[in-house]
Image: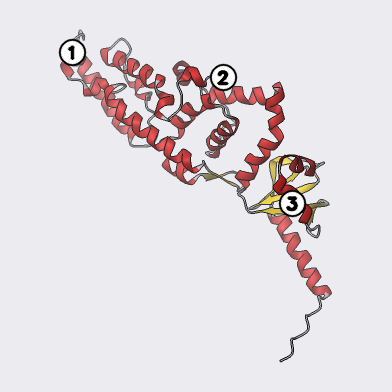
Amino acid sequence: MANQPARKRTRQDSIEDDKSLVLIATTASRSPDYWFTDGSVVLQAELTQFRVHTSMLLLYSSVFRDKLRELETKELVEGCPVLHLSDSAGEVTNMLFGFYHSLVKKYDIEFQYKSGLEVMRAVYPSTLEKWYSRNVPAIFKYKTDIIDCINLALKLGIQSLLPAAYLTICHDFDLILNGARRPDGSHVQLPFHVHRVIIQGRDRMLKDEPHKTLAWITQPSADVLKHCLGPSRCSATRTQAMVYLYRHSHNGKFGFWNVNNALPQNTTSHQIHEKGCLEMWEDLPAYFGLPPWNDIIQ
């Protein structure tokens, strides 16, 4: 049987193709961080588009040199060709941060790099005193924010942010393992090796708690109450604190040390608890396989 001649493309085919391109353009959302009006190419990852500069991609990536050389210009957004990527929107966001902000770090541009770093250090501090008094700014309002901060700290090598950040997220296994979606619909998650780091670190902390921050529970009552002037009252307070600890450890809101709020000052239990807090904070980097505080504080 003779081969059938190839069907000629009709004007209707062209119209349908144009419609599909319009549909792609209208369903995708723009990246809030990487949409430059003078950009010359649009990268699309999942349903997020990034309008960036061809020169920047060519400067940093030989892979993009090849992709852009082969790129067809039939799909356009605001006059820019669209390059579809198989990566997630979160991965592309992190990549572009590395491209655009590497010079920011190198030349120490104050208004971007240092101001952002100060905010992250306030949220994920390196001292116990600042941890107790920290106020999370309004810009940190989504579950994905902590993942973005951890990924950024890993990208820039700012290890001093990681212990407190890992401590903050270590109770949320779903967020650790599965990540979450940003308000723009893009998905962000932690690197696979970080899952293990955080979960193992949490396990080490839980094993240390009975001997440190919670030693006022595990030590014999006679030892804890021997300096108490009113043993019955002290015993009742200790019991109330234990009930507080039990309730908050089962609702996902219990922080390793916020039971401090339930222990009156100047009690033996409070002193034991405070001592344990200082010891565990000093060991916090080691729980997560990081060097000591003095070595990672920049």
Provide the residue designation for mark 3. 66
Q: Nearer the viewer, residue 201 or 258?
A: 201
Spot occupied by residue 39 in the image (x, y as percentages of width and height): 80, 43
The amino acid type found where label 1 is placed reads Pro
Residue 105: image quadrant is: top right
Q: Amino acid at mark 3?
A: Asp
> Vertically, is 46 above or below 123?
below
The residues bearing labels 3 and 2 have C-alpha atoms spaced at a distance of 39 Å
Secondary structure state at the residue bearing disc 1: helix
Q: Comparing marks 2 and 1, which lies closer to the viewer?
A: 2
Cα–Cα span, label 2 and label 1:
47 Å
Which residue carries the number 2 mark?
Answer: 298
Specify the farthest residue to the bottom.
1
In the picture, the quarter occupied by the N terminus is bottom right
Taking the view exactly as shown, the residue that stands out farthest to the left is 222
Residue at the spot of label 1: 231
